Amino acid sequence: MSASRRLLVTTQVVFFACVAVCALIAYGAGAESSGISYFGVHAPTLPLVVIAYAVAAMGLWRAAALLEGRDGVVTSTMRVVAVGLPLELVTPYNHGAFFNWAHMVIGVVIGVAQMGASASVAWRYRQAALSLATLVQLAGGLAAAMSLPDWGFNHMLESEVLFAFGYAWCLVQWTYAPRVLAVGALAPRGGDVADAT
């Protein structure tokens, strides 16, 4: 396993494990309506969310550095997400209108970056696993969007977890894909190019 892939897998496992423990501690209406962000404003789960976001941000930033030159679109969006995660923590949505709007804007930027990266690799690399990961992520994103209005569909937590899982899966699967030529065709070389990192 390449260093970049190992780093992504390890840090994403830590992220999802922390979120799972948070759900065990404080699953309820607050988490269903506010998603993972609820754990960042709920005192018993705040330390776990800090660990989850810090580890995920570090993993994305470092993996982007290891994969530099492989795909500028993906590595740039990995850095956007890495910066956005701690910003989500320092803008708690329950501290007034300014923080709520800042939190939402940062969340939208992170989500668009993640979806854009996944759609980009699914389109350019044309591999079934990448396409499936992107569809999982898209399903999570649509479910999260449906959880925003007052439609009685409060499944923000599950939706965000599904979205994040699809993104993580897409990134890991992308490290297996051969490079794409500038014209968009697959390079005629096989193997894991990222194994050199």
Image (tube, rainbow, N blue to C red):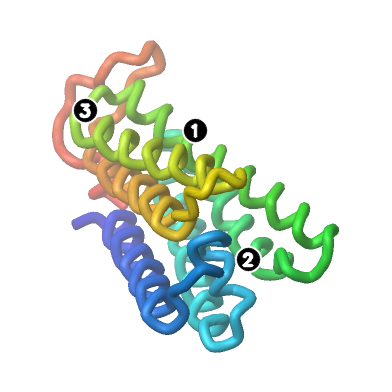
Describe residue 126's horizontal placement relative to residue 90 as left or right: left
- The answer to which of marks 3 and 2 sits earlier in the sequence is 2
* Kind of residue indicated by mark 3: Gln
Q: Secondary structure at mark 3?
A: loop
Residue 42: x %, y % from top left: 59, 80
Residue sitting nearer the eye, 101 or 113: 101
Q: CA distance from mark 1 to mark 3?
A: 17 Å
Instruction: Reply above or below: 82 against 44.
Output: above
From this viewpoint, which residue is outermost toward the front?
152
Q: Are marks 3 and 2 in contact (CB under 8 Å)?
A: no
Q: Amino acid at mark 2?
A: Pro
Tell me the residue at 57%/61% (across/down): 34
- Is residue 145 visible in this depiction of the protein? yes
Disc 3 residue crowd, few under 14, some 14–19, many 20+, Cα 10 Å: some
Q: Residues within 10 Å of mark 1 (few under 14, many from 20)?
A: some
Give the number of the disc on residue 116.
Answer: 1
Determine which residue is flagged by label 3.
Answer: 127
Q: Secondary structure at mark 2?
A: helix
